[in-house]
């Protein structure tokens, strides 16, 4: 039996199915200018990287040499997983011969990687964390990739990339890929936040939701409470407050892309404060905190170190870390008030 859909709703469904990521970028920019074409092509390459990583992860338990550690320690002093290396290389590979991105800077590389054949015309830089939540890799739990695009300023002839040491407000695009039960890509180019879901039968990211808005308040607080005794007293007081106040619930997955995605949809707050040994915390500004801050601000939320908006922090080095408090306006303000006023 066939069902005759009213023509409008059939068209609307088809139109949505055809709203791929690259088409969406053109819609957002309302232009087919060279800049719009570049940005659309860049997003398309990032999507390809996401598909390659998702494909490998989905078969990880069936393949040799995919899971586990490499035995190396990265520039952050953290043990490196085979999946970190693979995903790092995937992002480099998708931008080779693209004419789009001249430099890539990632959590896994001490210095930016230059693609010389792109540099004469590719005035963009990709900053990325290839695998967010690495500790989840070997247990088949949610993971992410985080990315930001910046326009290169100046010639950077000495390959020092000092123009990257600027505030996150200069990002022209940012987002993340969430490898969960389905693979999702969430991005902003400064005109709202939009999510896409990978349709494996098409091999395309298809629009899921446009102009996402984070609730002003949510019940979730997301933090690694194992660090309680290493935090400043103000953060401990905040945690004591949520423990004794009705209406809060804890969620922490070990992959902040996943935790922040939940907060984006349901509201609440994610925190990674500094500790006594590491006052700047764990998370890196340029390719973790700043891209996620751009997403959450664009969705109507906030991201702060506790003293200054994440997007206003000017780093002094590529792998600079910052404390991060991010999420619903009201919930971020609550943490901030403990940090600044003690209550
Ligand atoms: P990674 O990029 O090396 O995986 O580190 C970032 C991750 C975040 O996704 C997560 O929230 C945090 O580190 C977990 O760290 P911890 O185990 O200290 O709670
Ligand atoms: Mg990371």
Image: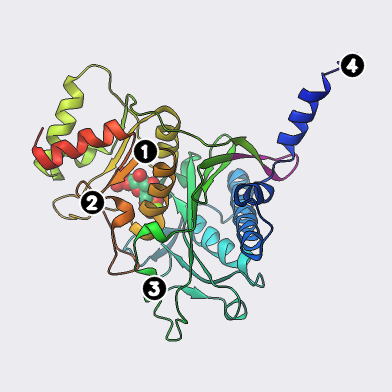
Label 1 near label 3: C-beta < 8 Å?
A: no
Q: What residue is pinned by disc 3?
A: 163
Mark 3 or mark 1: which comes first in sequence? 3
Which quadrant of the rendered structure holds the N terminus? Answer: top right
Q: What residue is pinned by disc 4?
A: 2
Q: What residue is pinned by disc 1?
A: 301
| Residue 2 falls left or right of residue 97 | right
Q: Position of residue 184 (x, y in %)?
A: 57, 41
Q: Residue at x 17, y 49 (%)?
A: 275
Q: Residue at x 9, y 36 (%)?
A: 342
Measured Cα–Cα span from mark 2 to mark 1:
14 Å
- Estimate how packed mark 4 is, as few (under 14), some (14 to 19) or many (20 or more) residues with alpha carbons within 10 Å: few
Mark 2 or mark 1: which comes first in sequence? 1
Q: Residue at x 36, y 52 (%)?
A: 289
| Residue 280 falls left or right of residue 49 | left
Asked whether 30 falls inside the magenta stretch, the response is no
Asked whether 197 falls inside the magenta stretch, the response is yes
Is the C-beta of the residue carrying label 2 under 8 Å from the nearest atom of ligand 1?
A: no
Mark 2 or mark 4: which comes first in sequence? 4
Disc 3 is placed on an element classified as: helix
Q: Report the mark closest to the observer, 2 or 4.
A: 2
Q: Which residues are magenta?
A: 196-205
């Amino acid at each position: 039996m066939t069902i005759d859909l009213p023509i409008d709703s059939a068209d609307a469904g088809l139109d949505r199915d055809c709203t791929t990521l690259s088409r969406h970028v053109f819609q957002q920019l309302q232009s087919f200018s060279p800049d719009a074409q570049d940005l659309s092509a860049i997003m398309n390459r990032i999507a390809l990287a996401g598909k390659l990583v998702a494909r490998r992860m989905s078969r990880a338990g069936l393949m040799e040499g995919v899971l586990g550690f490499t035995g190396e320690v990265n520039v952050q002093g953290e043990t490196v997983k085979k999946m970190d290396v693979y995903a790092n290389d995937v992002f480099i590979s998708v931008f080779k011969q693209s004419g789009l991105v001249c430099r890539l800077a990632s959590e896994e590389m001490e210095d930016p990687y230059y693609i010389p054949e792109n540099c004469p015309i590719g005035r963009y830089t990709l900053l990325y964390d290839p695998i967010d939540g690495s500790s989840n890799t070997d247990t088949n739990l949610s993971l992410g990739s985080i990315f930001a695009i910046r326009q290169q300023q100046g010639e950077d002839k000495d390959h020092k990339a000092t123009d990257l040491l600027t505030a996150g407000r200069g990002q022209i695009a940012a987002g993340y890929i969430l490898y969960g039960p389905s693979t999702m890509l969430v991005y902003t180019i400064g005109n709202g936040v939009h999510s896409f879901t990978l349709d494996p039968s098409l091999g395309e990211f298809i629009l899921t939701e446009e102009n996402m808005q984070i609730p002003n308040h949510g019940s979730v607080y997301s933090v690694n409470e194992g660090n309680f005794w290493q935090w400043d007293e103000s953060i401990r007081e905040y945690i004591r407050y949520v423990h004794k106040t009705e209406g809060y619930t804890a969620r922490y997955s070990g992959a902040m892309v996943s935790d922040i995605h939940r907060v984006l949809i349901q509201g609440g707050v994610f925190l990674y404060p500094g500790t006594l040994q590491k006052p700047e915390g764990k998370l890196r500004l340029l390719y973790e905190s700043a891209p996620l801050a751009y997403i959450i601000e664009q969705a109507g939320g906030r991201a702060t170190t506790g003293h200054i908006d994440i997007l206003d922090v000017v780093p002094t080095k590529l792998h600079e870390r910052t404390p991060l408090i991010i999420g619903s306006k009201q919930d971020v303000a609550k943490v901030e008030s403990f940090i600044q006023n003690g209550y």
